[in-house]
Image: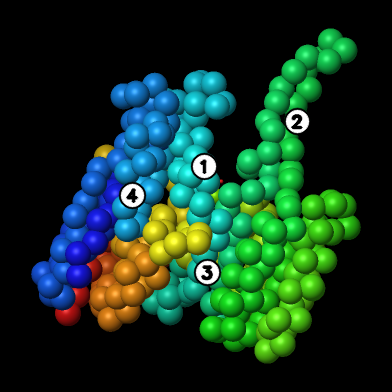
Amino acid sequence: MEKNIAVIRGDGIGPEIVREALLVLDKICDIYGHKFNYTEVKMGGCAIDEFGEPLPDSELSKCIASDSVLLGAVGGSKWDTVPGHLRPEKGLLKLRSGMGVYSNNRPAKIWPQLASASPLKTEIVEKGIDFIIVRELIGGIYFGKHETYDENGEKKAVDELVYRESEIERIGRIGFETAQKRNKKLCSVEKSNVLDSSRLWKDVMHRIAADYPDVELTDMLVDNCAMQIVKDPSQFDVIVTENMFGDILSDEASQITGSIGMIPSSSLGATSCGLYEPIHGSAPDIAGKDLANPIGTILSAAMMLRFSFDMVEEADAIEKAVSKTLDKGYRTQDIKTKGATDLIRVGCREMGQLIIDNIK
Ligand code: IPM
Ligand code: MG
């Protein structure tokens, strides 16, 4: 098969981790006889430097025209002082909404090899951590009006949180469908004791639940959910939630699995053209030092093969190669348990190469 992939290396560690993921994809092409054509797209701080804005329309068009997009990470302190509407992160939000990818899927699964890297007690980890956060990605407070103005001699800032029934329904259906393919438990997370948008969220979830009689729907307030994720993560199968709650809970969920550097994500909308990115940021503090963990990006590439290109065997091959590499004790610094003498610390490039060597 031939596929056109838009590649956004971005800022900070972005170029290093994307390089490894592309080498993995090249190996897949060699083994399975596919051809992937890569189109470079500039987004984030590097695009601000070159074009004066984080994602020019011409760069967005390349993404929309592709079969899928692979993204590293964007942002860094160098661009902290640019006006809010020009920040690197605005490029990412424009990309997500421009591609219409409303459904962000973030797995929180502990690799057995990394159990000791989890900050949770062994008895909690042993009960199992394997759930998915389905995060609404192109609505809510991220996309409402953002304003700061003077009022009565002081500054006032307003961020608007809007959800329409149709937006809630389409992500809700993804939540139910995801649960149907797993253990059939869906937990809808909101703040309905305070927010109107959350009360609407809850109403819509219960209305559409009638179409999925095989799925057990529960509701949970977001503050309680944050607590339950560390208290007993084994209770969760699929969590569906709005944009900002999903942002916060997915960082928390990643940490209990050992490292945010391990977690991939897929974002999909109405078509098979998806956006695939690790959930971590650009980590400017370790950029260019060969310290980054490329696994989140490599697993994101595997998700691209699985969900957008229907290349199930190829995706399995990548995931198995990651597992085998971890089995052999290789660890980047973020997942190396302190004092463990049986583990071998490697850099970003070596980790990438080891995974490539383990692809069969
Ligand atoms: C994420 C990130 C982004 C978000 C930032 C970089 C805008 O934290 O993908 O989780 O908040 O969505
Ligand atoms: Mg985040």
Specify whether residue 294 is in view. no
Q: Which residue is mark 4?
A: 65
Residue shown at 27%/55% (left/top)?
5
**Type of the residue with mark 1:** Leu
Q: CA distance from mark 4 to mark 3?
A: 31 Å
User: Which sits earlier in the primary sequence, circle 2 or circle 1?
Assistant: 1
Q: Which residue is mark 1?
A: 93
**Between marks 2 and 4 in the image, the one whose residue lies nearer the viewer:** 4
Residue shown at 37%/67% (left/top)?
308
- Tell me the crowding category of disc 2: few under 14, some 14 to 19, or many 20 or more residues within 10 angstroms, Cα based: few
Dot 3: element: strand
Answer whether labels 2 and 3 touch (C-beta < 8 Å): no
User: Which sits earlier in the primary sequence, circle 4 or circle 3?
Assistant: 4
Specify whether residue 149 is in view. yes
**Between marks 4 and 3 in the image, the one whose residue lies nearer the viewer:** 4
Dot 4: element: loop
Q: In the rendered image of this protein, does residue 342 appear above or below residue 102?
A: below
Q: Position of residue 187 (x, y in %)?
A: 70, 73
Figure disc tally? 4
**Type of the residue with mark 4:** Ala
Answer whether labels 4 and 1 touch (C-beta < 8 Å): no
Dot 1: element: helix
Q: CA distance from mark 3 to mark 1?
A: 23 Å
Q: Is mark 1 within 8 Å of ligand 1?
A: yes
**Type of the residue with mark 3:** Ala
**Type of the residue with mark 2:** Val
